[in-house]
Image (cartoon, helix red, strand yellow):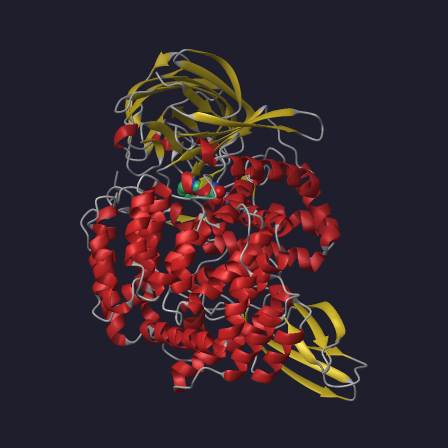
Amino acid sequence: MRDAAPQTIYLADYTAPAFWVDEVHLTFRLAPTATRVLSRIRFRPNPDAPGPFTLHGEGLTLISAAIDGTPITPDLTDAGLTCAAPDAPFVWESEVEISPQTNTALEGLYMSNGMYCTQCEAEGFRKITYYPDRPDVMAPFTVRIEGALPVLLSNGNPGASGPGWAEWHDPWAKPAYLFALVAGELIAHPGKFTTRSGKAVDLNIWVRPGDEGKCAFGMDALIRSMDWDERVYGREYDLDVFNIVAVDDFNMGAMENKGLNVFNSSCVLASPETSTDANFERIESIIAHEYFHNWTGNRITCRDWFQLCLKEGLTVFRDQQFTADMRSPAVKRIDDVLSLRGRQFREDNGPLAHPVRPESFVEINNFYTATVYDKGAEVIGMLKRLVGDDAYATALDLYFDRHDGQACTIEDWLAVFEDTTDRDLSQFKRWYSQAGTPRLSVSDAFSDGTYSLSFRQTVQPTPGQTDKQPLVIPIAVGLLSANGDEVVQTTILEMTEAEQTFQFHGLAGRPVPSILRGFSAPVILARESDPAERAFLLAHDTDPFNRWEAGRSLARANLVAMLDTGAAPDPHYLSALGSVLDDSSLDPAFQALVLSQPGQEDIAQALMTAGKTPDPIAIDQAQETLADAMSAQLGSTLERLYDAMQVPGPYSPDAEPAGKRALANTVLRLLTRRDGGDRATAQYDAADNMTQQLAALAALLDTGRGAAQCAAFYDQWHQDRLVIDKWFGLQAGLARADAAVETAQKLTEHADFDWKNPNRFRALIGGFAANPAGFHDPSGDGYALVADWLIRLDPINPQTTARMITVFDTWKRFAPARQAQMRAALDRIGRTEGLSRDTQEMVSRILAG
Ligand code: TRP
Ligand code: ZN
């Protein structure tokens, strides 16, 4: 259903619901195009917020409705219904009909490969039945499912069942967005967990026949997550069963429905033959994320959707801690910062910039963003750094105690920190309301044994916010002496003013500062320092994040100089890299990160910070030139490392062997530039796991080779959807400049390009849009290709379309001719007849910003 005039919703307009819900009974009579949903809901007027009785409902056919047993005829609108209601508790009953088979938006009740499933966050429950579909209305649900399918699942604990029917009861009051139902021919991979207070929990991962061999890792990750949440946060599971279902058609990664998590199959199914090391790590973290939501999201939920970061920022922060504990904290921090800079900084410094807690929206699905999730997590990291680990733990205990069973706000969250630490967090709170990435400029001085660091913070204007206030910025600093010894260990400087100077006394000589250790705040550090100092930090810093950062800033500066003044690859940078690679005491995963070049977005941001206009094609070419230079200059080191990093024996996804493979495969990419593809070809032929196979194929494609392997890969894997997604993505993502658009075009004509499946669409169209040589082809054909496909997808799946249109959000940073091409593509999408509200909102924000 399309809304003619999209409405803007404001945080400031929040009012409590006029009616509370005490109990929900639902009966589903499943049929592909005519499912009946019967509801019996006990309502109670809210004396604090009297108002008319209205229920949300979209695309429902109302069969009947009654209040306290008396049939009624409500007033129906596009968005729901309204009718007269008693001024005392009453029972609402309704029957509606819906058509899951024709629901292509994948929101509400829909079908995927013959299986029924639901996605209700954020506002999908209103496509299932009439209900107050808002997160502050919480109730226990009892559900009866009728359908001729072997497996019938819903939230909570299983009740009675028989052939063709099953009942479920969820005793924990929950908002409608956490409702879930799954029905189909599914196979369980079972597991068990006993909570520390002795409660036995049955665990299951439900998959389609054929996928049962890909569940063991997910189950293991789930058990480790449950154990970790008990040990680290004192949080126990609270139902008799915990079910996970893998679904092939899904708009996002996964969903934390109470007791019944639904996963995009790409985020749970894993096997050594079909999944890469990166897939294993991502699956582990998403399983943890959704499980952790049971407390941070479900037991304590959001009062309204403006508070989304309350659950998402905190849950991301928790899953990041989990991964750091399971693997390497240093490597995890670097990975998280890479993704923060690549996605969130881009968002925060472009037309889509918005606060971690937005103040208005048209379509809430458009606010499941890197800012809400990842900057939301950074803000919690800063809070923890400021108050310390013990105070953080105390505040969290109070949060869980005080707010269990409630729908909360950011004010509630900050209050537990204020109450346990006596800190005034009113200035800190600006991190939630002020959009934009702060720039932190630094200058230093040394005299008479005193070293001074002076900082200045500024934030550029963002859409709707021109006037920026100073933030509280925790700046972790350490000082090194000229011989590499640490003379001042990591201290947190607490910056609160626009400009502030901090002093260190009693130093024997001028130190080398290591600033923003561990990336202690999500800011852009602008410090003019000479390459020698960066090389020194790359060799000596005790903080692994800043050690990596030193190498990265050398590379970035080199690339900027190459682009700006035609400079050559910097021999000092290359020899500093060589020293890191020769240091066998370092973690190979860390070395792999040091050896990786800054990406397209990182370089573009560096150019813009220096006041230059980025050209994506020129950036791509500079990266090629630098890679060739690395390959040439580091030759023998790379050859030695490639051999030293080979992992013998059976595959294990653990951090240690995965780190070795990461280094070997980063090295392979460089070696393939000079060995005629021999190593990659041999690795491809010998590979017994997907990490090795895919890395070899990527190295070949990257250098314009690999046609034979590509064909063989397809023949080997054409029956595995998730592997074929990789096949599409790799070709579209790595096609070289002269053939990229044509390659993508050809792939869209492939019989397996099932564009209605979001994973396949993201693999090919998203993979292509992430390939600068293709998307940014000077002809403008890349923009046109993506625009064509977004226009085609929008009517069937607005959510995925609106997410992917963000590939155009950089248009204003480019030179006029390119701007005009991108703008033309955006305009064409914007002018499309009947464009969804989701995509309309995105187009107008991207164009306006
Ligand atoms: N709450 C989910 C998570 O972060 C996100 C999610 C899954 C989602 N499916 C969605 C959000 C659909 C919006 C729409 O774990
Ligand atoms: Zn989440």
Q: How many marks?
A: 0
In the picture, residue 470 is in which quadrant? Answer: bottom right
**Is the residue 187 above or below the residue 827 in the image?**
above
**Is the residue 259 above or below the residue 158 in the image?**
below
Residue at point 45%, 58% (across, down): 354
| Front-most of residues 82 and 481 | 481
Residue at point 34%, 43% (across, down): 717
Residue at point 63%, 38% (across, down): 403
| Front-most of residues 245 and 17 | 245
* Residue 746 percent coordinates (x, y): 20, 55
Q: Is residue 435 visible?
A: no
- Residue 125 in the figure: left or right of residue 382: left
The quadrant in which the C terminus is found is bottom left
- Residue 414 in the figure: left or right of residue 173: right
| Front-most of residues 81 and 139 | 139
In the picture, residue 818 is in which quadrant? Answer: bottom left
| Front-most of residues 602 and 719 | 719
In the picture, residue 847 is in which quadrant? Answer: bottom left
Q: Is residue 710 visible?
A: yes
* Residue 457 percent coordinates (x, y): 57, 73
* Residue 173 percent coordinates (x, y): 55, 28
* Residue 688 percent coordinates (x, y): 45, 47
Farthest-out residue, bottom = 447
